[in-house]
Image (spheres, helix red, strand yellow):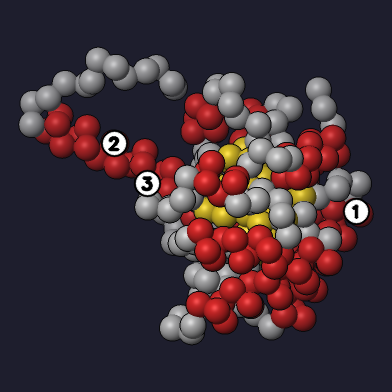
Amino acid sequence: MTTQAQRAQNLSELHAASEILRVVNVWDVVSAQAIIALPETKALATAGHSIAATFGYADGENIPLEVMLDMVGRIVTVAGDLPVSADLDAGYGDPGETTRRAIGVGVVGANVEDRLQPLAESVAAVEAVIAAGEAEGVPFALNARTDAFVRAGARPLDESIADAIERGRAYLDAGADIVFVPGPLDVDTTRRLVDGIGERKVSVIGLPGALTAAEYEGLGVARISYGPMTQRVALTALQDVAVGLYADGVIPAATRALN
């Protein structure tokens, strides 16, 4: 059994590898077990939006921290030697303490978003996360998120790219492992972000109609995750089969016993 520090180091090594790290987000124990069972799985990441939805909360730190961390801890328990990265939103008002508590349930990395707060405040949050990991003896693999695109409003694309690069470089200097830039990123935008932030230092989200993981890998991206999209796919399948059942259908014969 690997130690928590070893799992954190493993996650950092996966981020730095030439092959893009593909992380399929999970939101509860059974979804985690379904992904763990696949031989391609190298790490797990929780989706904060999906965990909140599971308990009936809207996204954005509306779910109580202790409820969210309890579910994350349950996921860590079934993950075994796989490193688990958690979505910690913006740190629930205290990124350092929230990270300490996440480490307490076995987490070895996290997304923490900047919500486009002033750069100095955002850098201080990154420093607090890294310091919490050091205090707990865990080389915490922070996937520092900038909302330079998702909260950009109507500003020009060039301004969002420049903002993401400035913030990304500052977060790396403050100890972040990689920089998460969610949003619909085409080839040119992705290339500019990688050129500005660093090869194998940019993390993206897979969205409908976005580039493939292989395409992002070819552009030098370190990691791709899918946020709430995986839960939406599962719920779409549930709703679609329910429509068939209401129409006197039957459970599809190809259904696998994954629970």
The three-letter code of the residue at mark 2 reads Leu
On the image, numbered disc 1 is attached to which residue? 134
User: Which is more toward the observer, 7 or 48?
Assistant: 7
The three-letter code of the residue at mark 3 reads Arg
Q: Residues within 10 Å of mark 3 (few under 14, many from 20)?
A: few
Q: Which label number is shown at residue 238?
A: 2
Say which quadrant the N terminus sits in: top right
Element type at marker 2?
helix
Question: In the rendered view, would you say 210 is above or below 40?
Answer: below
Q: Which circle's residue, 2 or 3, is located before the other in the chain?
A: 3
The three-letter code of the residue at mark 1 reads Glu
On the image, numbered disc 3 is attached to which residue? 232
* Residue 220 shown left or right of residue 52 in the figure: right
Disc 2 and disc 3: Cα gap in Å?
10 Å
Q: Residues within 10 Å of mark 1 (few under 14, many from 20)?
A: few
Q: Quadrant of residue 10?
A: top right
Looking at this rendering, what residue extends furthest in the left direction? 247
Q: Quadrant of residue 172?
A: bottom right
Q: Residue 146: x and y, percent? A: 63, 68
Q: Which label number is shown at residue 65?
A: none
Q: Which circle's residue, 1 or 3, is located before the other in the chain?
A: 1
* Residue 250 shown left or right of residue 223 in the figure: left
Q: Residue 31: x and y, percent? A: 49, 33
Disc 2 and disc 1: Cα gap in Å?
43 Å
Residue at 60% of width from left, 52% of height from top?
219
Residue at 71% of width from left, 54% of height from top?
199
